[in-house]
Image (cartoon, grey):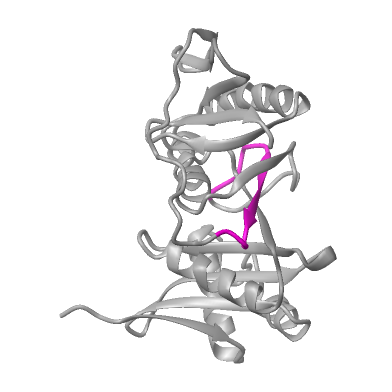
Amino acid sequence: MTTAVTLRTVHDVATIAAVADYFSDVWRTPRSAPPYPAEVLHSLVHAGGAVHTVHDGERLAGAAVAVFGPDGDTYSLVAAAERGLGHAVKQAQRAWAVERGARTMRWTFDPLAGRNARFNLAKLGAVGTEYLVDFYGPMTDGVNTGDESDRLTVTWDLTRDPAAPVRPYDAGPRGEATGAAPDGGPLVRRDPDAPRLWCRVPEDVVALRAADPGLALRWRHAVREVFTAAFAEGCAATGMSRDGWYTLEAAV
């Protein structure tokens, strides 16, 4: 029997506490020290933000938190969901923001996390608009410990028809390689016919950090160098292929 998937906007103390526990499990922290404490989430809701959840039957399977920023922009503080449910929870955030007149939503994620990049850029159609070096400083959760906390800001155009086609997953690189990645393979390829380049990231940075934190940190520094140079030249991150290549091209 297939259980029903439901989306909820939550306000009650008990469900918000369950969301805090869920985020602890995702980021591998003790539930006594969650990355987003329940009292903080409740305060954000009271201040006009929103906590959305996705349930698989009665089981909490994902959650997201959003607040309003300056000029009617919205900011997604955090979102996590089981595979296959992330799109639903982001669409719930989108509907909430659009109902309140928002035109864009921003959030950050680890640029080395290729699966997240594919979801944000290729599935949702957001654009990477800012590269932030060591944004949070040292982090001590079970996912990020031992690494530097670079983040990529993405901007999601909420006025765009959510049913419209987005970028293909497999818009992979062409052209000659111009740098070596820490694993010995190619790091960058440049388009010989357009102001466009591609940058490769590791297949699974979380697993790599656990197995070889030194190698993961070398990836961090290598990708940082490419991105900061590209963004300084006016590029944005517009795509991510299934085999781990970002597309960086002139911002529109």
- The image quadrant that residue 228 belongs to is top right
Say left or right for 72 vs 107.
right
**In magenta stretch: residue 158:** yes
Q: Nearer the viewer, residue 94 or 177?
A: 94
Vertical arrangement, residue 116 with respect to residue 209, above or below: below
Vertical arrangement, residue 89 with respect to residue 193, above or below: below
Q: Residue furthest left?
A: 1
Q: Residue furthest right?
A: 70
Where residue 219 appears, as percent x and y from the top left, is 56, 25
Identified at 57% across, 71% down, the residue is 93
Where residue 170 appears, as percent x and y from the top left, is 38, 34
Vertical arrangement, residue 113 with respect to residue 27, above or below: above
**In magenta stretch: residue 74:** no
Where residue 173 appears, as percent x and y from the top left, is 45, 21
Residue 157 shows up from this direction: yes
Q: In the picture, which quadrant includes the N terminus? A: bottom left
Say left or right for 175 vs 64.
left
Vertical arrangement, residue 242 with respect to residue 11, above or below: above
- The image quadrant that residue 195 belongs to is top right
Q: Nearer the viewer, residue 52 or 214?
A: 52
Identified at 39% across, 63% down, the residue is 82
- The image quadrant that residue 61 belongs to is bottom left
Residue 149 shows up from this direction: no
Identified at 61% across, 44% down, the residue is 127
Q: Nearer the viewer, residue 170 or 153?
A: 170
Q: Which contiguous range is marked in magenta?
A: 143-160
Q: In the picture, which quadrant includes the C terminus? A: top right
Identified at 50% across, 68% down, the residue is 91
Main SS class of the magenta portion in the image: loop
Where residue 43 appears, as percent x and y from the top left, is 75, 81
